[in-house]
Image (spheres, coloured by chain):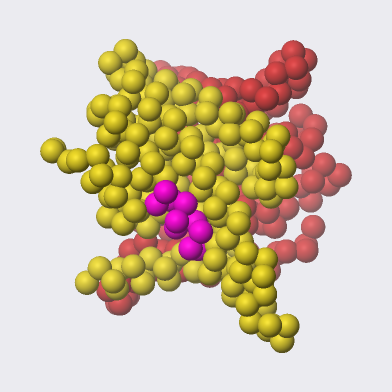
Chain colours: A red, B yellow
């Protein structure tokens, strides 16, 4: 990934390496918040917002603190602390200064702490040894890919509500199979970048 | 709530078997189960973290202030995840490489945090141990089952040994990303059928 240009990096993170459908990260909110379009859009926005900031901050923490003081093995705990406190901070900040956006994101902000797409994307950025700017771009791409897949999936799921589904397949079961088909369509992007 | 220790243990094996009943912690379930070996490895790593974090959370449940409990739980869990990460890196390096990203992600596995919050923070030491062990083994079994199905159909092998002979054309869909979703969905459907 580190040898890609900015444009191909964005294409790669949104489509080819889609964080939900190709890397299997963030599946709990994917299935949990996709029953209604409204919640899906809220979650997608919250993820874009937090993931870009988390990507930047974890890069700085990793390269300026952990590597310098030889504490690389503490990466997991350091990152999760950064993400948890970032989410708290963003929540407080939005509540105070942009109440409209805060009302829009609502309960999805605190849920992001345990969204493995956020931690996962930060770890991928470090593992792929991306530069600061590139990890910012990659975080943005991953977040947009997450939002895209979530919103597409929510659209399909709203339609499924109107269909007659056999009893044992209802709810999560048909949801997973739908996700499989959606993942198959994203599969067509393989080999593009 | 007069459940015995055995009941706490066995509920994780069927009644509350994690990925199917609770629909939590799906990322490792889908991500690492391309072979049965990976599934079992991931399951055991998660079981260890679940057991240790349940014990510690339960032991500290009267000391941890309720307002910051989630943060405390996450720190406890992250500590054990680092332990697992370092141990696996030292002793099972090939497996460590194959599971890769999913080992640090045990921190944000909703099952672990969910058990700490829903069970260990309200119950004594012994029931919490039983609960952690039961849910962990249930999780391992589900991962192993999914891994076995995907491995048998996707590559025609079981634990690395050939099942259908050399003429079998592997159904590679199963070991790729879409196959994981479809396979889990169908397994959930079969479980629902059994329930009736």
* Residue at the spot 79% in from the left edge and 35% down from the top edge: A129
Indicate the position of residue A187 as horizontal and vertical percent values.
65, 66
Q: Nearer the viewer, residue B6 or A146?
A: B6
Q: Is residue B79 visible?
A: yes
Question: How would you classify the magenta stretch by its main secondary structure?
Answer: helix
Vertical placement of residue A131 versus A189, above or below: above
Instruction: Name the residue rendered at 37%, 45% in the picture.
Output: B135
Residue drawn at the location 29% of the way across and 31% of the way down: B126
Query: Dividing the picture into quarters, in which one does residue B150 lie?
Result: bottom right
Count the marks: 0
**B132 horizontally vs A70: left or right:** left
Of residue B161 and residue B1, the one placed in the foreground of this image is B161
Residue sitting at the far right: A3
> What residue is drawn where x is 46% and y is 24%?
B76
Q: Position of residue A19 (x, y in %)?
A: 61, 50
Question: Per the image, is B141 magenta?
Answer: yes
Q: Is residue A47 magenta?
A: no
Q: Position of residue B115 (x, y in %)?
A: 35, 37
- Work out which quarter of the rendered image holds the C terminus of chain A and state it: bottom right
- Does B166 sit left or right of B194 as displayed? right
Q: Quadrant of residue A52?
A: top right
Q: Which residue range is magenta in the image?
A: B137-146
| Front in this rendered view, residue A188 or A170 | A170
Q: x, y percentage for residue B2?
A: 13, 38
């Amino acid at each position: 990934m580190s040898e890609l240009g900015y444009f191909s990096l964005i294409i790669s993170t949104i489509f080819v390496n889609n964080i939900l459908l190709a890397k299997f990260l963030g599946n709990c909110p994917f299935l949990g918040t996709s029953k209604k379009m409204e919640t899906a859009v809220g979650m997608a926005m919250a993820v874009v917002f937090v993931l870009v900031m988390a990507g930047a901050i974890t890069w700085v923490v990793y390269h300026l603190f952990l590597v310098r003081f030889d504490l690389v093995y503490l990466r997991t705990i350091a990152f999760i602390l950064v993400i948890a406190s970032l989410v708290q901070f963003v929540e407080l900040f939005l509540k105070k200064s942009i109440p409209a956006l805060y009302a829009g994101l609502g309960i999805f902000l605190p849920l992001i702490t345990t969204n493995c797409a956020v931690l996962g994307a930060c770890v991928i950025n470090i593992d792929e040894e991306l530069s600061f700017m590139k990890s910012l771009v990659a975080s943005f791409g991953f977040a947009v890919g997450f939002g895209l897949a979530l919103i597409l999936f929510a659209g399909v799921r709203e339609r499924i509500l109107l269909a007659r589904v056999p009893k044992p397949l209802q709810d999560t079961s048909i949801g997973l199979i739908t996700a499989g088909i959606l993942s198959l369509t994203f599969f067509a992007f393989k080999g593009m970048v | 709530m007069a459940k015995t220790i055995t009941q706490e243990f066995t509920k994780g094996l069927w009644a509350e078997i994690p990925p199917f009943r609770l629909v939590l912690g799906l990322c490792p379930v889908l991500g690492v189960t391309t072979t049965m070996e990976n599934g079992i490895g991931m399951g055991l790593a998660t079981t260890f973290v679940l057991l240790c974090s349940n014990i510690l959370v339960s032991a500290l449940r009267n000391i941890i202030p309720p307002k910051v409990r989630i943060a405390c739980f996450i720190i406890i869990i992250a500590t054990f995840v680092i332990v697992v990460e370092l141990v696996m890196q030292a002793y099972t390096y090939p497996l460590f490489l194959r599971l890769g990203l999913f080992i640090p992600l045990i921190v944000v596995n909703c099952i672990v945090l969910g058990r700490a919050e829903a069970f260990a923070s309200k119950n004594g030491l012994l029931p919490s141990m039983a609960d952690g062990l039961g849910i962990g083994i249930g999780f391992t079994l589900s991962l192993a089952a999914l891994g076995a199905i995907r491995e048998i159909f996707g590559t025609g092998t079981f634990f690395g040994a050939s099942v259908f002979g050399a003429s079998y054309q592997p159904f590679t869909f199963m070991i790729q990303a879409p196959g994981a979703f479809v396979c889990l969905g169908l397994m959930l459907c079969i479980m629902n059928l059994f329930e009736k």
